[in-house]
């Protein structure tokens, strides 16, 4: 897992360079953006299984990045559950990028000043 805090005016070319060169993420052939409400909800187990399997298969077969709000609630929680359910070193790598607002990150203080590198 990697972490970066950006400003609204951060240089996106430098961010892409960091993700591809430093973090060794392959450039995506597709971006799957999953966004929704933050209110938690239950999915019937069959629907959750179909959603999880379909999302992971789509990402694996296309070399996609999955983008979410990066929070552990609502739709993003279901995306996280789908990705957690496939944790195995033998499976093809799936890149997921969470982009949460700074204000919702727990234990922010633990992240400030740690391994600081300027872009």
Image: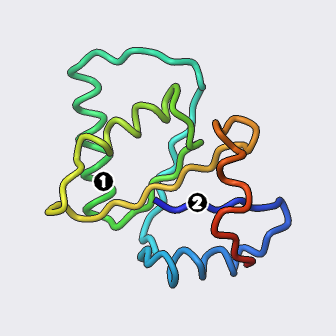
Q: Is residue 33 above or below residue 39?
A: below
> Is 82 on the left-hand or right-hand side of 67?
left
- In the image, which is nearer the foreground, mark 2 or mark 1? 2
> Is 108 on the left-hand or right-hand side of 55?
right
Give the secondary structure at mark 2: loop
Q: Distance between the residues labelled 2 and 1?
A: 25 Å
**Residue closer to the observer: 8 or 119:** 119
Percent of width and height locating residue 68: 54, 45
Q: Is residue 99 above or below residue 65?
A: above
Q: Name the residue under label 1.
A: 58
Q: Name the mark on residue 3.
A: 2
Outermost residue toward the right in this view: 9
For the C terminus, the image quarter is: bottom right
Q: Is residue 82 above or below residue 41?
A: below
Mark 2 is surrounded, within 10 Å at the Cα level, by few (under 14), some (14 to 19) or many (20 or more) other residues, namely few
Give the secondary structure at mark 1: helix
Mark 1 is surrounded, within 10 Å at the Cα level, by few (under 14), some (14 to 19) or many (20 or more) other residues, namely some
At 49% across and 35% down in the image, what residue appears? 76
For the N terminus, the image quarter is: bottom left
Residue 7 sits in quarter: bottom right
Residue 90 sits in quarter: bottom left
């Amino acid at each position: 897992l990697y972490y970066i805090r950006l400003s609204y005016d951060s240089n996106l070319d430098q961010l892409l360079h960091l993700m591809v060169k430093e973090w060794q993420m392959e450039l995506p052939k597709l971006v799957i953006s999953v966004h929704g409400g933050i209110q938690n909800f239950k999915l019937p187990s069959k629907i959750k299984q179909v959603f999880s399997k379909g999302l992971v298969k789509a990402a694996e077969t296309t070399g996609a990045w999955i983008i979410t709000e990066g929070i552990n609630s609502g739709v993003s929680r279901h995306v996280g559950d789908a990705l957690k359910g496939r944790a195995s070193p033998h499976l093809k790598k799936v890149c997921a990028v969470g982009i949460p607002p700074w204000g919702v990150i727990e234990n922010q203080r633990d992240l400030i000043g740690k391994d600081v590198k300027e872009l």
